[in-house]
Image (cartoon, rainbow, N blue to C red):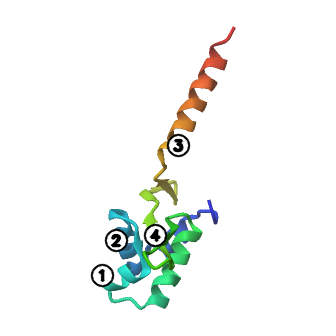
Amino acid sequence: MGKEWDPETIFDVLGSERARRILALASVQPVSADRIAEHTDMSLPTIYRRVNALEEYDLLEADTRIDTDGNHYKTFETNLERVCFEIEDGGFDVDIRLRRDMVDQFEEFWGDLESSARSDEP
C-alpha cells in the first residue's frame, strides 16, 4: 500500500465528490483521464490531482495502454471494494477492503492451508 491509512485521511480523500465520481466511473471498467473528463465537468488537471491522491492510497490502480497509433496512455481502475466506519469508545476506526486479483486470493488461500497444516502437526 502507498501511504498509511488513518481515519482523517479517508475522510479527506473520499470526502471529495470528484474523487468519488472517479472511483464510480473506474469501477465499471478501466477509464482514461479523457474519458473521465467526457463524463464529468472536471478539467484534466483536476482529474489528475484526484487520480494521484487516489493512487497514493491504493484506491485506484493505473495501467499503461497503447492505442492503435502507438501512443501510450493510462487507464484507471477502482481498487476500492468497501469502506466501513465504526464509532466506539469515544473514537472511530476505518476498515478499508481493497479488491484483490485471483493470484492474491489464491496465495492467501494457499498460505492459510499451509498454516493450518503446520498447526495440525503433532
Residue 82 on image: x %, y %: 41, 56
Numbered disc total:
4
Q: CA distance from mark 4 to mark 1?
A: 14 Å
Of badges 2 and 3, nearer the viewer stands 3
Q: Mark 4 near mark 2, Cβ–Cβ under 8 Å?
A: no
Residue at position x 57%, y 30% in the image = 110
Kind of residue at badge 2: Leu
* Mark before the other along the chain sequence, 2 or 3: 2
74 up-or-down from 91: above or below: below
Q: Earlier in the sequence, mark 4 or mark 1?
A: 1
Amino acid carrying mark 4 in the image: Phe
Of labels 1 and 2, earlier in sequence is 2
Neighbours of disc 3 within 10 Å: few (<14), some (14-19), many (20+): few
Judged by depth in the image, the label closer to the viewer, 4 or 2, is 4
Residue at x 46% of width, y 53% of height:
99
Measured along the vertical axis of the image, is residue 63 above or below residue 15?
A: above
Q: Secondary structure at mark 3?
A: helix
- Disc 3 marks which amino acid? Val
In the picture, the disc for residue 25 is 2
Q: CA distance from mark 4 to mark 3?
A: 20 Å
Q: CA distance from mark 3 to mark 1?
A: 32 Å
Q: CA distance from mark 4 to mark 2?
A: 9 Å
Give the mark nearest the N terminus, 3 or 1: 1
**Where is residue 102 shown, x and y percent of the image?**
47, 43
Q: On the image, numbered disc 1 is attached to which residue?
A: 39
Q: Which mark is residue 103?
A: 3
